C-alpha cells in the first residue's frame, strides 16, 4: 500500500523482513540498555554484524542508557543501509501510562535523526507490538500519524518512509489504520 502526500513524499506499507529492504536509515525496536535482544533487534544485529554493537557499547559508555521514547544512531554494518536508528518503545501496561506519547516520540526521534543526517529513505518496524505487548490495533494509528505528520512538512528531507511489517496480522492492522 502506498500513499503519496500532496508534497510528493511517499508513505508505504509492506510485509517482510526489514533487514532485507534497502534504505538510507533503518529503524530498530531496541531496549533502553541498547543491549540487543530478540525480535527485530536480534535480526538487525545478526544481519548487520558486530560493528553495530561495538558502536552501541561506545554510546552506552557515554550516555548510560537510551530513555524510552528516544533513539540513538549507529552505522549499519552489513545491512543495506547507512544508519540504524535504535528506538526504545514503551512497554505496554494498560494504555493509560503515556504509552501513545512515548510511541509517537520514538518515531519522531527517528525522523529527527534522519533530518540531521539527510537520510531520504527510512524504514520502520512496528515498534513495541512484539515483546513489549502494545496491541497492534492501538499502535498502528499512532505510528502512522507520527510518520505521516512529519512527511507532510514542506521542509522535510525525507522522501519516503516504509513500514516493513513482519507478519500478515500486523500488516492488516496497519492497512486498516492506513485507510
Ligand atoms: N523485520 C521486521 N519486523 C520484525 C522482524 C524483522 N526481521 N522481526 C520481528 N519483527 P519486537 P518490541 C516484528 O519484539 O515489541 C527485543 O528483545 C515483530 O513481529 O521486535 O518493541 C528488544 O531488544 C513485531 O511486529 O519489538 C527489546 O528488548 C515488531 O517487529 C524488545 O524486544 C516488534 O517486535 C522490544 O520489543
Image: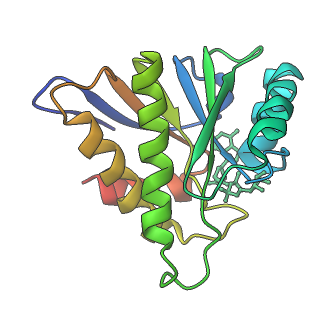
Q: Position of residue 42 (x, y in %)?
A: 82, 41
Nearer to the camera, 122 or 165: 122
Q: Quadrant of residue 137?
A: bottom left
Q: Is residue 120 above or below residue 156?
A: above
Q: Is residue 54 above or below residue 147?
A: above
Which residue extends farthest front?
A: 62
Nearer to the camera, 119 or 137: 119
Q: Position of residue 165 (x, y in %)?
A: 55, 45
Instruction: Name the residue rendered at 49%, 81% in the picture.
Output: 95
Q: Quadrant of residue 173?
A: bottom left
Q: Position of residue 144 (x, y in %)?
A: 35, 51
In the rendered view, how is the structure colored? rainbow
Q: Is residue 94 above or below residue 43?
A: below
Q: Is residue 74 above or below residue 128?
A: above
Instruction: Name the residue rendered at 32%, 59% in the picture.
Output: 177
Which residue extends farthest left?
A: 6
Position of the N terminus, as image quadrant, is top left
Q: Quadrant of residue 41?
A: top right
Nearer to the camera, 95 or 126: 95
Position of the C terminus, as image quadrant, is bottom left
Q: Position of residue 123 (x, y in %)?
A: 51, 32
Question: Residue 125 vs residue 45: left or right?
Answer: left
Number of labels in the image equals: 0
Nearer to the camera, 129 or 14: 129
Question: Residue 156 vs residue 63: left or right?
Answer: left
Instruction: Name the residue rendered at 31%, 20% in the picture.
Output: 157
Amino acid at each position: 500500500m502506498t500513499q503519496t502526500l500532496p508534497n510528493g513524499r511517499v508513505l508505504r506499507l509492506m510485509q517482510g523482513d526489514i533487514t532485507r529492504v534497502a534504505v538510507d536509515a533503518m529503524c530498530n525496536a531496541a531496549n533502553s540498555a541498547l543491549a540487543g535482544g530478540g525480535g527485530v533487534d536480534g535480526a538487525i544485529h545478526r544481519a548487520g554484524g558486530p560493528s553495530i554493537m561495538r558502536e552501541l557499547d561506545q554510546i552506552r559508555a557515554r550516555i548510560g542508557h537510551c530513555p524510552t521514547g528516544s533513539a540513538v544512531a549507529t552505522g549499519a554494518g552489513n545491512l543495506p543501509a547507512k544508519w540504524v536508528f535504535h528506538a526504545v518503545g514503551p512497554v505496554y501496561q494498560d494504555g493509560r501510562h503515556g504509552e501513545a506519547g512515548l510511541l509517537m516520540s520514538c518515531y519522531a526521534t527517528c525522523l529527527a535523526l534522519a533530518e540531521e543526517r539527510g537520510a531520504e529513505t527510512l524504514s520502520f518496524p512496528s515498534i513495541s507490538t512484539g515483546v513489549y505487548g502494545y496491541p497492534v490495533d492501538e499502535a498502528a494509528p499512532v505510528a502512522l500519524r507520527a510518520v505521516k505528520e512529519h512527511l507532510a512538512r514542506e521542509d522535510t528531507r525525507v522522501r519516503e518512509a516504509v513500514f516493513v511489517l513482519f507478519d500478515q496480522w500486523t500488516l492488516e492492522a496497519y492497512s486498516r489504520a492506513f485507510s
